[in-house]
Image: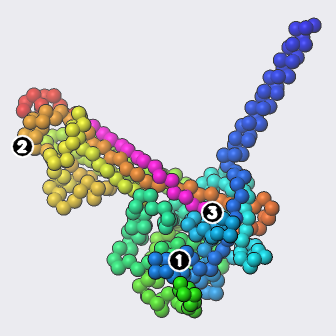
Amino acid sequence: MIERILSMKKSKLTILAVLCFICAMAISIFATNVKATTMEFGLQEYRKTGEDGNQYAYKISNKNIWKLITYNGQTLDYDKAIYSLKAEQTFNKSSQGAYRQEYDVSYNLKDKTSIPTLPIAEEDYNSIIWILNHTYIQSNEITENEKETLLKNAQITDNVVLTDDDIDVVQQLAIWYFTNKDNATYHLDINGESSLPEVLEAKKESSGIIEDYKNIKDKSQNRFNQMETLFKYFINNAKLATEEINNIEVPLSLDKTQPTEEIVEDNYIIGPYKINKDTDLPYALNVKITDRNGNDLTNKYTLLDENKTDITDKTIEDLVGQTFYLKIPVQAITENSIDGIKFKIEGRYNTTKVTYWTSSKESDVQPVVEIEKEPQIFSDENEVIFKLEEQNSL
């Protein structure tokens, strides 16, 4: 009888333990995908004060391109990278006369399976993720060349006149191009090609003087042309985006073709080498070429192109995406007892964290995304071991 009672108690404890485990797992999963933090977002017509001491505002047609900010009490924070996913959707107006909205639910937008209702059309999801992955964040230049890389990828390199605010506006309009397809103000195609709507700008001087909105084309045709070039770069690449493309994060990798060595006249020719560029996202790269004992060979090799012709005006960093070889004199090999070569790449890049904010209290709030760049490191290497018979014959 006692054994039966103990057995029943043991069974109940087991069931209770299983239920606790299930609850803990459910809480863990929920916590992973949904944050309970509350954030208050606001809309501002004029953007953060620039280096010239002025603030600028933008419109297309008669529609404001609002700058989304956060609040710390009554203090406005312009430094977060925040974008709205739908133009002209509800944003409450507080009693103080400022457009403010409290959000209390957030998801990882890059994990769409965790979101009960996707805030954008399924067919546009990969396009939006591509744009958000490639946005330039003014206050977060972790790799130090994000702006330069973005403009270079868009083929804007000569006489750059774009401001950081211009880039921010273009990025917002690129999102709206996909999420407001039924509105020609935001989704403008001319002759089957995406086109940037005419953009107006107003300036608020530090003295308080406010100028009227003026067409940027009238201020500088070159500036508008660069804005449109950047806009088309975002749209055209976003249209081609796939889940596979969006999931590639590490920007560089060594080609898997194993380099070999051969002796040509009085030199070792080692290769082929190729550093693959797997994304067009910014990176910082460092290349180390050593012998197998870790001794630096920087001044002992010459670069050769894919035809094994000397390269005199480029570094390895300039050859990303191209095939090349290393040339080392036989004399340097023998004098330094080099029995092989180690080729290593290492560097830094950013991954993009995209938080989608919404409200549990109001179903029609403006869907908002907050973008954060998170620094990462990468490395890859290979090794060539010289053949013993060649070493012995020297």
Q: Residue beneath label 3, please?
A: 369
Please report the residue visible at 64 percent of the width from the left and 66 percent of the height from the top.
70
Mark 1 nearby-residue class (10 Å; few <14, some 14–19, many ≥20) = some
- In the image, is residue 88 above or below residue 61? above
Residue 41 in view of the camera: no
Quarter occupied by the N terminus? top right
Q: Could you say whether the residue bearing mark 3 is in a helix, strand or loop?
A: strand
Q: First in sequence: mark 2 or mark 1? A: 1
Q: Where is residue 15 in the image (x, y as percent from the top left)?
A: 82, 25
Q: Could you say whether the residue bearing mark 2 is in a helix, strand or loop?
A: loop
Q: Where is residue 354 in the image (x, y as percent from the top left)?
A: 59, 58
Between the residue at mark 1 and the residue at mark 3, the CA separation in whole angstroms equals: 23 Å
- In the image, is residue 10 above or below residue 223? above
- Part of the protein shown in magenta: 369-384
Q: Which residue lies furthest to the right in this view?
A: 1
The disc label shown at residue 49, or none: 1
The disc label shown at residue 315, or none: none
